[in-house]
Amino acid sequence: MGLDKIIDHVLVPKHEIVPQDKVAELLVKFGPKAANLPQILRDDPAVEEIGAKRGDIVKITRDSHTAGKSVYFRVVV
């Protein structure tokens, strides 16, 4: 009686890999290098499930009571 996927759980925010063609645009906004972004571990269960690899940038979208939605970016290490 387990969950099919971790990312389908109500408490896990939406995780998605930022496409390579959007990375440059993102880095212009947040800094010249992906290394400047906060990190997320490659063995994080949600990261493993979406198939992210070391160096990928993950977009995490959380529900927020004050802002509606809040978006975070992490680089996979």
Image (cartoon, grey):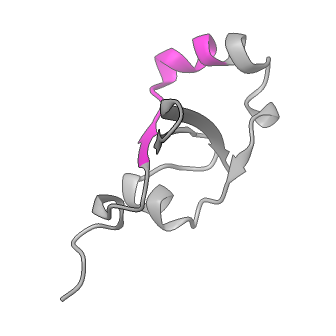
Residue shown at the point (79%, 17%) measured from the top left: 32
Front one among 62 and 32:
62
The N terminus lies in which quarter of the figure? bottom left
Front one among 4 and 72:
72
Front one among 37 and 55:
37
Q: Is residue 10 above or below residue 59?
A: below
- Magenta segment includes 71: no
Residue shown at the point (48%, 41%) measured from the top left: 65
Q: Position of residue 15 (x, y in %)?
A: 43, 46
Task: Spot the residue most to the front.
Answer: 66
Q: Is residue 68 above or below residue 64?
A: above
Location of residue 35 (image quadrant)? top right
Q: Position of residue 20 (x, y in %)?
A: 50, 24
The boundaries of the magenta stretch are 14-26
Q: Position of residue 48 (x, y in %)?
A: 46, 61
Q: Is residue 76 above or below residue 28?
A: below
In this picture, residue 1 sits left or right of residue 52: left
Residue shown at the point (39%, 60%) measured from the top left: 49
Q: How many marks?
A: 0
Residue shown at the point (70%, 10%) measured from the top left: 28
Task: Spot the residue most to the bottom.
Answer: 1
